[in-house]
Amino acid sequence: MNVSPASLSKSNPTRVAASEVESLPLMTRQQLVPFLNAQGIPITKSVLNKLSAPKINRGPPIASWWGKRPLYTPSEALDWARSMLSDRPSDLPLIEDGTD
């Protein structure tokens, strides 16, 4: 199955096998959003842009640059997105159960 970044649109999400992720070309941030959504990561363009802002600096690792535009390796971006998953909301404090 050949998967191109253009085929990963909101109307046609395609789940990509791990072996095929390695062979995908570099992607822009806009191309990463539908790719990550198709892999089950619920991220939006605005959240990815915010996390990738220089002041926040918590976005996916940049593989290279095309002029001023950062390019990302799909496999590294997917690994980054999976590392951002947690078992509880990050804005809630940890509640102690009181048993010591």
Image: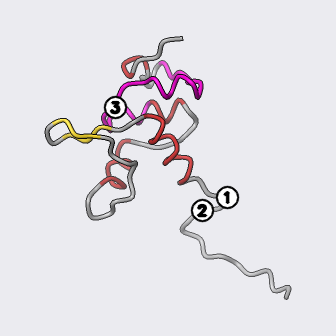
For image coordinates 58% across by 53% down, the residue present is: 85
Q: Residue furthest left?
A: 67
Q: Earlier in the sequence, mark 3 or mark 1?
A: 3
> Which amino acid lies under the numbered mark 2 shown in the image of this protein?
Pro
**Which residue is at the front of the view, 27 or 23?**
23
Expressed as whole percent of the image width and height from the top left, the position of residue 30 reads 32, 35
For image coordinates 33% across by 41% down, the residue present is: 63
Above or below, comparing residue 94 to residue 53 in the picture: below
Q: CA distance from mark 3 to mark 1?
A: 28 Å
Expressed as whole percent of the image width and height from the top left, the position of residue 19 reads 57, 25
* Residues shaded magenta: 12-34
> Which amino acid lies under the numbered mark 3 shown in the image of this protein?
Met
| Residue 27 numbered tag | 3
Q: Is residue 17 left or right of residue 23?
A: right
The quadrant in which residue 6 appears is: top left
Near mark 2 (Cα within 10 A), the count class, few <14, some 14-19 or many ≥20, is few
Question: Helix or strand or loop: what does disc 3 sit on?
Answer: loop
Question: Helix or strand or loop: what does disc 2 sit on?
Answer: loop
Expressed as whole percent of the image width and height from the top left, the position of residue 45 reads 36, 42
